[in-house]
């Protein structure tokens, strides 16, 4: 039986790859929530299907506009909701803290209220996408599991703690079929250039094209973290949603999702440079790229996830990083020259 799936943030890296995964692996109808003025770059591979209304449809709205969310929920009546929309860059959240909290916390609240207004007979499976940033700056060199204390280390991480708690509250108070994921660093093609590995890959592509001196500018390199490809992440999201749909997850369950490979950020730079023919590249610290507080140790226990679904990362970090570098090479070759930020 064909189901209806709503993806908030469908124009983002993860949202667009969620749509691609679902179109390839299911026969469901996909509805994507986006703001009308958002760029469609990440959806260009799907625009023919969108134009012909072939299993994928766009809905215009905004997390900060409750009336638009009510209308979309009423019109679509989705069986599954993947809530992926957010102001998602931690460093930017120091500069726009109010917008970050309004979009991530109040936007999530408005979405959940729009669902609640449909009445108790409407019971979609809801995925609330939280973040590993909720664990914040490590107090000790430990591995975080789902019961580890939360520590806001940026307005973004505080907003995701709020989002996380809202999901748990609505699951408990209103019996919503909600599961929550705390995602570690997930990257690959289409990763926004404001994130560390993507800005490094972008700068290498600019250097290769002769558009930047052979210097890569970075922030804090002392961070230790796992990486995984976003395509592996969306596969886990769908598998968890199926478990919830089958009644095999408790409402409000929380899952860490993270890669198995551990890296210092300097290693990520070395891997990306190894893919380039330009070898005389310097690395310099740019104070403008430093955060006031950095969540600099992000290691996660994912045994709960792997005991729940038959999942493990399939795409290596090297493949993920090469895909990311090639993404920026393609952008530049097509004369879409990115900002040097």
Image (cartoon, rainbow, N blue to C red):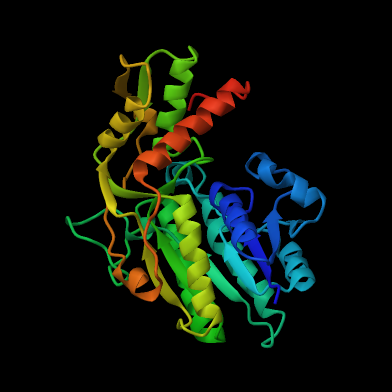
Residue 284 quadrant = top left
- Residue visible at 45% across and 83% down in the picture: 250
Residue extending farthest to the right is 52
Residue 247 vs residue 286, the one in the foreground: 247
Nearer to the camera, 163 or 323: 323
Q: Does residue 239 appear left or right of residue 109 in this picture? A: left
Position above or below: 165 against 48: below
| Quadrant of res 56 | bottom right
Judge from the rendering whether residue 23 lies leftward or rightward of residue 195; answer left or right: right
Could you say which is closer to the camera, residue 282 or residue 294? 282
Residue 324 pos. (x, y %): 46, 36
Give the image location of residue 191, x and y in percent.
50, 41
Task: Please say if 116 is above or below 120.
Answer: above
For this orientation, the residue located farthest to the left is: 141
Question: Which quadrant of the view contains residue 213?
Answer: top left
Can residue 341 be seen here?
A: yes
Task: Identify the image quadrant of the N terminus.
Answer: bottom right
The residue at 20%/57% (across/down) is 139
Q: Residue 76: horizontal and vertical position, in percent? A: 75, 69
Q: From the viewer's perspective, is 46 left or right of 259?
A: right
> Above or below — where is 110 with respect to 314?
below
- Seen at 36% across and 18% down, the residue is 215
Residue at screen point 44% across, 17% down? 207
**Is there any visible trace of residue 296 in the rendered image?**
no
Instruction: Give residue 287's position: percent from left, percent from top.
Output: 34, 28
């Amino acid at each position: 039986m064909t189901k209806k799936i709503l993806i908030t943030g469908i124009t983002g890296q993860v949202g667009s790859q969620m749509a691609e995964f679902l179109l390839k692996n299911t026969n469901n109808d996909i509805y994507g929530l986006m703001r009308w003025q958002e760029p469609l770059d990440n959806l260009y591979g799907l625009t023919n299907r969108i134009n012909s209304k072939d299993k994928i449809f766009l809905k215009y709205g905004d997390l900060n506009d409750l009336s638009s969310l009510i209308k979309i929920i009423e019109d679509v009546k989705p069986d599954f909701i993947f809530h992926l929309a957010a102001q998602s860059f931690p460093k930017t959240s120091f500069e726009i803290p109010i917008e970050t909290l309004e979009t991530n916390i109040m936007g999530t609240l408005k979405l959940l209220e729009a669902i609640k207004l449909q009445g108790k007979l409407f019971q979609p499976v809801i995925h609330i996408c939280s973040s590993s940033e909720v664990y914040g700056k490590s107090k000790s060199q430990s591995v975080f599991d789902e019961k580890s204390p939360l520590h806001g280390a940026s307005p973004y991480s505080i907003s995701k703690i709020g989002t996380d708690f809202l999901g748990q509250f609505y699951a408990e108070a209103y019996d919503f079929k909600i599961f929550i994921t705390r995602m570690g660093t997930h990257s690959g093609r289409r990763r926004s250039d404001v994130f560390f590995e993507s800005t490094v890959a972008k700068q290498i592509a600019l250097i290769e094209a002769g558009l930047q001196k052979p210097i890569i500018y970075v922030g804090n390199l002392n961070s230790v973290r796992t990486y995984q490809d976003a395509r592996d992440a969306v596969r886990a999201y769908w598998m968890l949603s199926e478990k919830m749909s089958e009644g095999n997850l408790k409402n409000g369950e929380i899952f860490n999702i993270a890669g198995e490979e551990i890296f210092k950020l300097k290693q990520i730079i070395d891997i990306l440079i190894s893919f380039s023919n330009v070898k005389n590249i310097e690395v310099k610290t740019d104070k403008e790229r430093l955060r006031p507080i950095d969540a600099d140790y992000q290691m996660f226990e994912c045994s709960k996830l792997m005991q729940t679904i038959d999942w493990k990362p399939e795409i290596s970090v090297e493949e993920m990083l090469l895909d990311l570098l090639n993404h920026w090479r393609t952008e530049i070759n097509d004369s879409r020259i990115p900002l040097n930020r």
